[in-house]
Amino acid sequence: MITIVSGTNRKGSECLQFAKKYAELCRLSTDEEVKLLALEDIDHSWFHADMYEKEAMSPGLIALQDEFMIPARRFIYLIPEYNGGFPGALKLFIDACSVRQYEATFKGKKAALVGIATGRAGNLRGMDQLTGVLNHVGTIVLPNKLPISRIYSLMNKEGEIIDAPTLKVMQKQIEELLAL
């Protein structure tokens, strides 16, 4: 299974548009099950002071981990640039998932990273930061990290990604991840 993570809890994010396009391209490239986890759509009641205690983990977080994280062999993390890094909501989610079934959730799994930015750098720093976090939990990060810059110039008025060169490099990254 491949889990695509739209790594922000901001409602109506452009990141989610790119995550949906990745899901579509993945489904056309493999028979493997593809699931999309949008952090903006999940219940955040698991975020509390005792979330780092196994006994206090919320049933909602356990369900997310069991459905999206543990069965996945591969991940695609789409991360918008927030203050020169990646969103705290994604870091918090990874931290929360590390409390229970740490190895089953992260160890030896493969991940592709996609930086999303309105500016020029495509969230290069955020991808480097997330690489460090994922390496620490035992996830193998694909060397081809894809910075996608100036996203508004790549989309039409409906928010669809229409830029042919961008779609081509997205497809190439998916193929590389599938080859791992």
Image: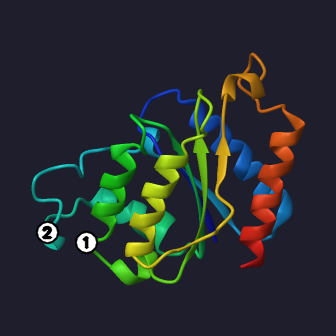
Residue 100 relative to residue 176: left or right: left
Q: Which residue is mark 2?
A: 53
Q: Looking at the rendered structure, which numbered label has been put on residue 133?
A: none
Describe the element under mark 1 as helix, strand or loop. loop
Q: Is residue 161 left or right of residue 53?
A: right
Q: Amino acid at mark 2?
A: Glu
Where does residue 133 sit, x and y in percent of width and height? Answer: 39, 65
Relative vertical location of residue 2 with respect to residue 166 in this rendering, above or below: below
Q: In the rendered image, is residue 38 in sight?
A: no
Instruction: Indicate the position of residue 121 as horizontal and vertical percent values.
Output: 60, 38
Q: Earlier in the sequence, mark 1 or mark 2?
A: 2
User: Closest to the observer: 66 or 158?
Assistant: 158
Q: Residue at x 62, y 58 (%)?
A: 35
Q: Are marks 1 and 2 in contact (CB under 8 Å)?
A: yes
The residue that label 1 is drawn on is: 99
Q: Residue at x 67, y 28 (%)?
A: 150
